Amino acid sequence: MASDTKRAKVTIVMADGSVHKGELTVGTSGRLESVLLIDAPFLEFHPHEGMPRFIAKAHIVTVEAEKFVREQQAA
């Protein structure tokens, strides 16, 4: 059985001024605001180049969404 994991294509600006472009995992709800509001200190981020990593929410200044991508994963 496959489950849908959705990602939002985003540009994230950090408190230090660095800019990160890639995809943010938003889960099955597909709502970016839902993942930003959950009580978790980190967000799962998949940059356009490089390995996936976790970004500290406390250091994010802005998140700009471009569009959503659906990824099929085996359960």
Image: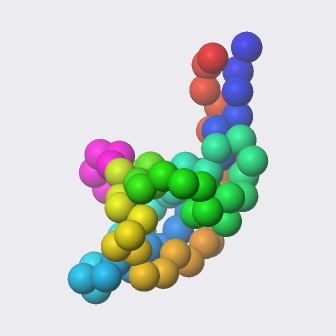
Residue 44: give x, y in percent of width and height.
Answer: 44, 49
Residue at the far top: name it. Answer: 1
Q: Which residues are magenta?
A: 49-53
17, above or below 8, in the image: below
Residue 5: give x, y in percent of width and height.
Answer: 64, 38
Q: Give the colour scheme of this rendering.
A: rainbow
Report the residue at 29% width, 46% height from top.
51
Q: Horizontally, is 13 left or right of 35 in the view?
A: left
Of residues 72 and 32, the one drawn nearer to the viewer in this rendering: 32
Of residues 50 and 34, the one drawn nearer to the viewer in this rendering: 34
Report the residue at 67% width, 65% height from top.
33
Report the residue at 54% width, 54% height from top.
39
Quadrant placement of the N terminus: top right
Overall secondary structure of the magenta section: loop
Q: Which quadrant of the structure image shows residue 65?
A: bottom right
4, above or below 27, in the image: above
Q: Horizontally, is 13 left or right of 4 in the view?
A: left
Of residues 15 and 51, the one drawn nearer to the viewer in this rendering: 15
Residue 43: give x, y in percent of width and height.
Answer: 45, 54
Quadrant placement of the C terminus: top right
Of residues 58 and 46, the one drawn nearer to the viewer in this rendering: 58
Count numbered badges in the picture. 0
Report the residue at 64% width, 44% height from top.
27
Q: Is residue 56 magenta?
A: no
Q: Which quadrant of the structure image shows residue 71?
A: top right
Task: Using the rendered image of the protein, determine whether residue 11 is visible from the camera's viewpoint.
Answer: yes
Q: Is residue 52 magenta?
A: yes
Task: Using the rendered image of the protein, determine whether residue 45 is visible from the camera's viewpoint.
Answer: no
Residue at the far front: name it. Answer: 39
Residue at the far bottom: name it. Answer: 17
